[in-house]
Every structure is written in structure tokens, then in C-alpha cells.
Image (cartoon, rainbow, N blue to C red):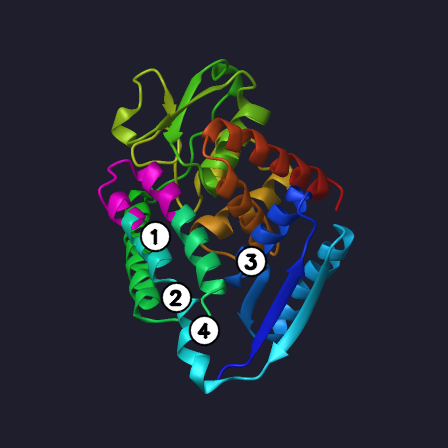
Amino acid sequence: MTDWTTLILALPSENATARTRLWRALKALGAASLRDGVWLLPRRPELASALAAQVRAAGEAGGQAWLLDVAGVADYEEQFAALFDRSADYAGIDANLRELAAQADEANLKRGLRQARKHLDALVGIDFFPGPARAETERRLLGMEAAQRQRQMASEPGFTEGEPERLDAGQFRNRLWATRRDLWVDRLASAWLIRRRIDRDARFVWLAEPQDCPPDALGFDFDGARFSHVGRRVTFETLLASFGLEGDAALKRLGALVHTLDVGGTAPEAAGFEAMLRGLKSRLDDDDALLAAGGQMLDDLYAAFSTT
């Protein structure tokens, strides 16, 4: 039988801002409203500090609040639990996933799946009485995420035999460069390297498909591109070798980090960089903006590697 916590609020009617702020905070915690000013939650240790914060917020707003623990009551167990039915919320996510399933643009699909995952994780966090709807929605999203990862892996370039050709960076100035859009580690780092050390006036085009590459563009990090995976090198490392940059110890360390995240390795900084890049991608949908923000991260890493 479930034990409950009841929050009773008495707020000044003229302080609409405080009332709205507390309402939003309690909804975010998953609280159910029994009536105006009376909120119910199953008793959970992890909710105690958040509820105590709402009591303080009510006092600071000129009101009062009381937290009351209520032992389980068999006669009301089913009625109270029904207040926390999240089926409609899962149905909303399911409807969004059905729309995404018809999405032909891979970048938009990936962005939509990230948003759906964020919404589902938040909903699961306040689903105190999970039922079949939760399991079905989780199964559907996991399946779509797995399928998207498989397609992404299939689009990654393979390795060609041999060694990168040695080139003069002076012959690669003010050029148009092209790679697959929805930048990830190797493409992002390679674009950063191109602009920082090879072609400072580089212009970039982000491709929906490699076959869309303009004939006058220098492609990188896709099969058939001018610069891609060669031997055991990922694209970033191929660029280092091609343009005589392997003597820079800091760039070599960045290369090891990119290699680790792209095809595997042991660079100790890789996990932290990946986490930060995922954070950037969760809020930036535009590849130009991602290159600017991610490039700053790489600038900072390069500076740190240059001093150690």
C-alpha cells in the first residue's frame, strides 16, 4: 500500500507570478492536484528536498505551506493512483514517433528522436505507477533509435589501403569543402582543423547525401571523398598527415581523441569531450553554429594539450 505526501498551499491571490511558478514546479515533480492549493505525491525520499524547497518558496512569496505525510489508505489507493495515470502523455509521445517514422530527412529524424528521448526520460521520472503504455512507448523509441544508429553506421566511410598523399596547404586556399551534415566528432574536428591550419578562408557545405557534393568542392569524411579514412587513420588524422601537421604534439593528441570516438581507442579525454558535444547537439540544430561552438571547445583543448 502506498504512503503519500500532501502539500497544502495558501498563497496571496494578488501574487500571480508566485502561484504560477509553484504550479509549474509541482507539475514538474509529478504532483497531482486534489483541489485548489492541495497537492498529492506518493512518498519518496528523493522528493523530500524538492518539496521542502516549495514550502520555502511559498513563505518567500508571502504565503504559507504545510507538508503532511499520510499513511496508505486502502479505500483510496486506486482512486489516488489514478490521478497519476500518464497514459495520455505516453500517447502524445507515440503520436510524435509515428510522425517521425515518416520523416525522410535523416537529420530531422535524428533531431526529433533526441527530443522524444528527452521528453520520455522526463516523463518516466514522474511515472510513479508505470503501466503497459510506458513499456510500449519505450519499446517503440528504442527500436527507432537502434534503426537510426544502424543507418548512421552504414553511412560512415570505410578505410582505404595505403598512406595519405603529402600536399602543400598553399594549394588549398579559399576553397569550398563539403562533408555530411549533422556533424559528429570526426567531421567537426576535421572542419575545425581545415579552418584553423589548412584553409583559413574555407567555406563549408553540409551534405544531405555524399552524392550531393558539388563538383568544385573538396569532400571529406565520406566514401569517395578527397580526404577520408586511409590506412588506420580517421579523416582528422589523414588531414594531419596530408598537410604535414603530425609534428604538432597537441594536434596528435586531438587526433587520438577523435580516433577513439570514431573507431575506438583509449584517449582519456574522449568521454568528457563526447559528453560536452552531445550537450551542444541537444541545443544546436544548425551545423554552422555547431562548428562555431564545437570549434571553441577544440581551441580550448588544443591550448590545454599545448601546455602539458
User: Dot 1 corresponds to which residue?
Assistant: 93
Dot in front, 2 or 1: 2
Q: Given contact means CB atoms under 8 Å apart, are the residues at marks 1 and 4 in contact?
A: no
Instruction: Measure the alpha-carbon separation of dots 4 and 3.
Output: 16 Å
Element class at badge 4: helix
| Residue name at image x 36 percent, y 48 percent | 113
Q: For mark 4, does the 10 Å Cα neighbourhood hold few (<14), some (14 to 19), or many (20 or more) residues?
A: some
Q: Is residue 106 magenta?
A: yes
Q: Earlier in the sequence, mark 3 or mark 2?
A: 3
Q: Disc 3 designates what residue? A: 36
Residue 212: quadrant of the picture: top left
Amino acid, disc 2? Asp
Residue in front for this viewpoint, 37 or 302:
37
Q: Amino acid at mark 4?
A: Phe
Point out the residue furthest to the top here: 174
Query: Closer to the camera: disc 3 or disc 2?
Result: 3
Dot 2: within a 10 Å radius of its alpha carbon, few (fewer than 14), some, or many (20 or more) residues? some
